[in-house]
Image: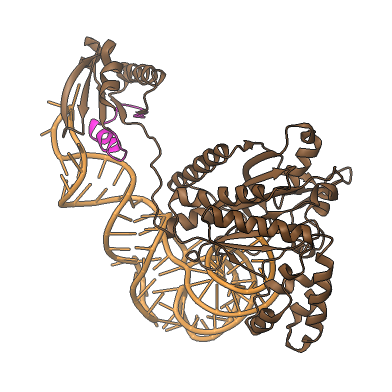
Chain colours: A brown, B orange
Amino acid sequence: MSAIQRLKGFQDILPEDQPYWEYFMSTAADLARRYGFSRVDVPIIEKNSLFERGVGTASDFFVKKEMYSIEESDGDLITLRPEFTAGLVRAYVQNGMQNWTQPVKLFTFGPIFRRERPQAGRFRQHNQFDCEILGETDPVADLEVMLVAINLYREMGYRDLTFQLNSVGCPVCKPVFVEALTAFMQEHLDKLSEIDRERLQRNPQRILDSKDPGIDDLLARAPRTIDYLCEDCGSHFADLRLLLERVGESYTINHRLVRGIDYYTKTAFEVWDQRIGAQSALMGGGRYDGLAEAIGGPSTPGVGFGMGIERAVLGLKAEEIVPPALEEPHIFVAHFGGETKIAAVEIASRLRQEGLGVRMAFARDRRSLKSQMRESNKYPIQFVLIVGEDEYADNLVTVKDFQSGGEQLQVPLDQLSHWLADRLS
RNA sequence: GCGGGUGUAGUGUAGGGGUUAACACGUCUGGUUGUGGCCCAGAAGAUCGUGGGUUCAAAUCCCACCACUCGCCCCA
């Protein structure tokens, strides 16, 4: 009988990777707060209908059955969130945030679930950092969200990032574009692959991000969303471009960057890093002015992004960025069993209460000092406190200082914590 | 859902139809009675992914399955 294995596409994040995660999370939270965002946390499970309406049944989550859903005993269908935005907008509506000072700027972290085929930088459970600005139509909101995204990578040490930018219009202008695109594609049906023909039926815009190299030329000549923008969308896009230029951010207009669903409006953007294999999109975001209404709330504009943390960590490694080390104890307490063990436990406990990190030697019985010293050497220990019978009798400990090459001296118990604290910068 | 790759101790590898499956790192113990890093000695740890087939003989060849992995689709 073999031991039970973890599920496909899921992963364990081991201690050796934690510095990267800690680095990401603390940098992200700090940056988001600097831009005026507040943290919220929402459930990882919601009613399936939230995603049905908030993600759209035309999306692959539904079409390809990529969501993890559970039918409850009363027949309700509940679903592990495949993305953050729908849940955050639900929280906005449900908690009456439309009555807070607008706009409301939120960020969150947590796991996302999609039942896709795993590969490098893509998992069935992955974690995201997510930022949203709700209740604001000003393109400055779009700009801020983009700046949080790209500056987060920069603060962590990434280089050579590019913005991909597009505007997908709104319910006023998008249909005109889709009609033009469809007409164009109908004339070139012979050049389309089977999946692209199917897309043309189901969700014509998606043809634009087809990876079929055979239609690159065709797509280059196809109608472009930005040529069909209505006045409102056009000026929003122009304003955003001006803002980006004024703050010195370069971007590439990517006419093939689209969102297939109507409540995604205007701005669509991604940040790319070419160094992490096929999954070059580090994050994706955009505006969704129709979403709140789609889930039954008051009409509320919104713009935001989701950022994959696993992918960011992959990128950190690819860029050879070394995160700060996590704090570990620098004090090790060794003993000789019996009363000395109990004394050692007391000493360790007192030092920890004083705020010092202490690693305790475990030993069911008496254990050789050699093996305890060897153990301490596996860790970044500076001081080994030796609690022996003699020391115990005299109310002191022998302190061995590895940093000075192993020098030893005796320190009275009542001075120990000060003595150590003074020497551990 | 579709393609490609890989499966040998905890990890990384070597080997390869014939019976003690190798090496490195890691782990543990010891190198005298209370002292680390180096060194030395030793130990534990693998039914060579699973099942079937070929063969006197399979971890080595064949098939299937499974797992992992990379890529497509899509996305973070």
User: Which range of residues does the magenta coloring cover?
Assistant: A360-381
**Foreground pick, A391 / B29:** A391
Q: Quadrant of residue A224?
A: bottom right
| Quadrant (top left, top right, bottom left, bottom right) of the C terminus of chain A | top left
The location of residue A240, given as percent across then percent down, is 64, 55
The location of residue A17, given as percent across then percent down, is 46, 48
Residue at position x 75%, y 53% from top? Answer: A288
Q: Is residue B24 left or right of residue A207?
A: left
Above or below for A2 versus A228: above
Q: Is residue A120 left or right of residue A135?
A: left
Q: Quadrant of residue A118?
A: bottom right
**Foreground pick, A349 / A355:** A355
Residue at position x 69%, y 56% from top? Answer: A114
**Foreground pick, A187 / A214:** A187
Residue A124 seen in this snapshot: no
Residue at position x 73%, y 83% from top? Answer: A193
Residue A116 seen in this snapshot: yes
The location of residue A47, given as percent across then percent down, is 81, 45
**Foreground pick, A353 / A177:** A177
Is A168 magenta? The answer is no
| Quadrant (top left, top right, bottom left, bottom right) of the N terminus of chain A | bottom right
Q: Residue furthest bottom?
A: A190
Above or below for B64 versus A80: below
Above or below for A240 versus A260: above
Is A374 magenta? The answer is yes
Q: Residue furthest right?
A: A74
